[in-house]
Image (cartoon, helix red, strand yellow):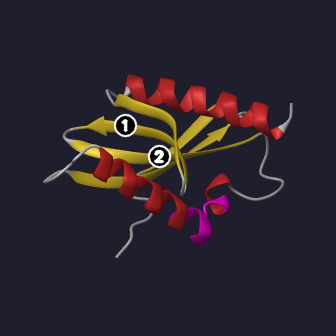
Amino acid sequence: MNNKEVGNIGELLAEKYLREKNYEILENNYRNLYGEIDIIAKKDDIIIFIEVKSRNSNKYGYPREAVNNVKIEKIYNTSLVYISKNNFSDIQFRYDVIEVYLNKNEINHIENAFYIS
């Protein structure tokens, strides 16, 4: 399985997981000129921007370690455009990372994985 296939499967599993946890999926693979956000969801009046990282093994480290400062900045800037285009005001936002371990059939949801001050 190549990296694109692993990523696609991971995103589908993450979306299924979120739906089971009563998240409303607003967008998949939202793109703009700044970058892409894998999943944008809503739960309890909070908009959540979610980066999904999938792996077949930990040979190259934990999936969350791939969400570095450059990736965080892209996600943040992308989210600002989404917020502006949708005229959101007085709504809370959160940035999560979902790790999908395909080899273990396991998901690790890291809420508030990062924030921008």
Quarter of the image that includes the C terminus: bottom left
Task: Write the residue at 40% across / 23% down.
Answer: 20
Under mark 1, the amino acid is Ala
* Chain part drawn in magenta: 66-72
Query: Residue 103, can we see it?
Result: no
Q: Is residue 68 above or below residue 102?
A: below
User: CB of mark 2 within 8 Å of CB of mark 1?
Assistant: yes
Viewer-nearest residue: 106 or 99:
99
Q: Main secondary structure of the magenta part?
A: helix
- Residue under label 1, please give it: 41
Expressed as whole percent of the image width and height from the top left, the position of residue 22 reads 31, 26
Q: Is residue 46 left or right of residue 19?
A: left
Task: Write the residue at 70% across / 37% down.
Answer: 7
Q: Is residue 117 above or below residue 82?
A: below
Under mark 2, the amino acid is Ile
Q: Is residue 27 above or below residue 72?
A: above
Q: Residues within 10 Å of mark 2 (few under 14, many from 20)?
A: many
Residue 2 lies in magenta, yes or no? no
- Residue under label 2, please give it: 50
Q: Is residue 16 left or right of residue 103?
A: left
Expressed as whole percent of the image width and height from the top left, the position of residue 37 reads 51, 46
For marks 2 and 1, the one nearer the N-term is 1
Callout 2 secondary element: strand
Callout 1 secondary element: strand
Residue lying at the far bottom in this picture: please name it. 117
Expressed as whole percent of the image width and height from the top left, the position of residue 89 reads 16, 52
Expressed as whole percent of the image width and height from the top left, the position of residue 115 reads 39, 67
Quarter of the image that includes the N terminus: top right
Q: Quadrant of residue 107?
A: top right
